[in-house]
Image (cartoon, helix red, strand yellow):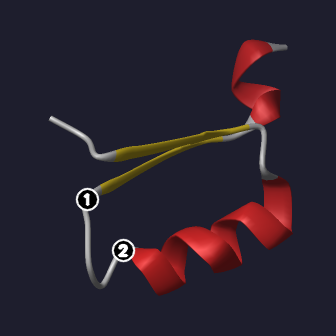
Amino acid sequence: MYDVIIIGAGISGATFASKISKYTKTLLIEAQDYH
């Protein structure tokens, strides 16, 4: 369902995801979710 998946991207990844989310559905998975 998602076009882009960013894993463990952190702040910079979240910023990038927020920019591209205007064009595509984005799933942001933070690294701490796996700790």
Q: Which residue bears the numbered disc 1?
A: 25
Neighbour tally class for label 1: few under 14, some 14-19, many 20 plus, Cα within 10 Å: some
Measured as percent of width and height from the top left, residue 13 is found at 73, 63
Circles 1, 2 touching at the beta carbon (< 8 Å): yes
Element under label 2?
Answer: loop
Horizontal arrangement in the rendering, residue 5 relative to residue 12 (left or right)? left
- Quadrant assignment, res 33: top right
Q: Which mark is residue 8?
A: none
Quadrant of the image containing the N terminus = top left
**27 is higher (above) or lower (below) than 19:** above
Q: Residues within 10 Å of mark 2 (few under 14, many from 20)?
A: some
Helix, strand, or loop for circle 1? loop
Question: Residue placed at 26% from the left, 79% from the top?
Answer: 23
**Whole-Å distance between the Cαs marked 1 and 2?**
6 Å
Apparent side of residue 15 relative to residue 18 in the rendered image (left or right): right
Up the image or down, 32 lies above or below 22; here it is above
The residue lying at 30 percent from left, 85 percent from top is 22
User: What residue type is disc 2 on?
Assistant: Ser
Q: Position of residue 25 (x, y in %)?
A: 25, 59
Residue 19 at x, y percent in the picture: 50, 85
Q: Is residue 33 left or right of residue 28?
A: right
Name the image quarter holding the C terminus: top right
Give the image quarter of residue 8.
top right
Identify the residue position indicated by label 2 in the image.
21
Residue type, label 1: Lys
The residue located at (67%, 79%) in the rendering is: 15
Q: Count numbered badges in the picture.
A: 2
Residue 2 at x, y = what percent? Answer: 25, 41
* Residue found at the far left of this picture: 1
Q: Where 14 falls versus 32 (above or below)?
A: below
Taking depth in this image into account, of 18 and 23 the one nearest to the observer is 23
Q: Nearer the viewer, residue 19 or 11?
A: 19
